Amino acid sequence: MFYTDKTLCVFLFFALIPGHICSARIKYPTVLISILARNKAHTLPYFLSSLERLNYPKERIALRYVDRIRSDHNIDNTVEILEKWIISVQHQYHSINSEYVDSDSYSDEQGPNDWSMLRFENVISLRQSALNYAKTAWADYLLTLDCDVFLTNKNVLHYLIAKNLTVVAPMLKSSGLYSNFWFGMTDDYYYLRTGDYKSVVNREKLGCFETKMVHTCVLIDLRKIESDHLTYVPENVEGYDGPRDDIITFAVAANKSDIALTVCNEEVFGFLMIPLEQDDTIAFDMLQLTNVKLEVLNEQDKLYVRDDLLEYTVLPEKDTLDFDKIFMINLLRRPERRKRMLDCFDELGLDVTILDAVDGK
Ligand SMILES: *[C@@H]1O[C@H](CO)[C@@H](O)[C@H](O)[C@H]1NC(C)=O
Ligand SMILES: *[C@@H]1O[C@H](CO)[C@@H](O)[C@H](O)[C@H]1NC(C)=O
């Protein structure tokens, strides 16, 4: 039996009535993913691996990666990891553009995580340049992404685009109540915890919600005319009297232009890490990474890493926490629990002796 496209279409039409199969096929909208990184080599293998697993057609995605590297502190292997990844995936994407910005110029900075004024200025200008770049490149959508986000839901881009909103963020979980949205904002534009926040973060209430602020992983529909009013630069917002802060400016610009900032938690989309405070060390961030990985393990499965990036991940040396032995008792007929616990022990560096339980049945 031989069908032309048309006869197959007519046949399918009567068989299944799938209206859209018969219409002219249309390419997916183009998405520019803009990634801003800094001192994050320890998260990169996880970040890049989950990014790559998104099921959105890669030929419709352009990636722009900007890392604020400190040339005097060439402590991590960001460049090596990134270049390795780019070489193996770049043929699949529309394009990948990586740029390393020397951040030594933050002369007023107290430490690697200090949010100095100059650094804020730098982030403002980098975020704005990503937005301008996306517009110049005629991207339909801009996804701004920080590289301590692990998007575990492969469908997230399709989902967000289908929402047809000007600004939308997938709710991301972390250890504790930290997330990538604010429900409340004080009169002087700072964070305010409000009543509903907890039930949304814990996904007791599900849906899409208007917020005061979304950050860290945000999709902007640049085809919407109103998106032209979005900006990260305080000077671009008439009458702006808030702090010089990229995400607060963005939130105020959106509000003044009547653009809703929506967060959705209908599905588990992914996880994020809590940003470092001034005195936090990279070692502390590694600990946070462990916490998030355990959170992911608890909710779904092991956080995925490409085989060729595994060498850049570190697991702690195993010990028994000064006890003589640590035991785990597990029923052989619950292999999935055993596997999950063994994965947890790997993450936590616990040397555990497994005992097969005797089934009470
Ligand atoms: C998407 O939203 C715009 C308004 O922002 C509306 O005009 C358009 O019809 C919507 N598209 C779909 C497919 O719902
Ligand atoms: C802008 O902020 C005001 C005051 O918080 C609020 O009432 C209004 O709904 C906001 N507008 C949008 C589009 O979110």
Image (cartoon, helix red, strand yellow):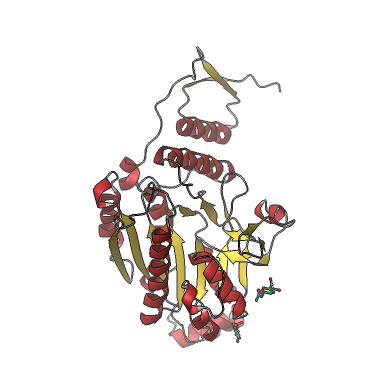
Q: Is residue 149 left or right of residue 265?
A: left
Tell me, yes or no, if residue 168 can be seen here: yes
| Farthest-out residue, right | 195
Judge by depth and name the residue closer to the eye, 152 or 222.
222
* Quadrant of the image occupied by residue 357: top right
In front of the other: 137 or 279: 279
| The N terminus, quarter of image | bottom left
Which residue appears at 42% of the width and 24% of the height?
318
Q: Nearer the viewer, residue 270 or 220?
A: 220
Percent x, y of residue 234: 49, 73
Count of numbered tags: 0
Q: Residue 70 location in percent, x, y?
A: 29, 52
Residue occupying the point 29% across, 63% down: 98
Side (left or right) of 184 relative to 311: right
Please name the residue shown 53% across and 65% down the image. 243
Coordinates of residue 76 in the picture (x, y in percent): 30, 45
Ligand 2 is found in the corner quadrant, namely bottom right
Q: Viewer-proximal residue, 353 or 226?
A: 226
Quarter the C terminus occupies: top right
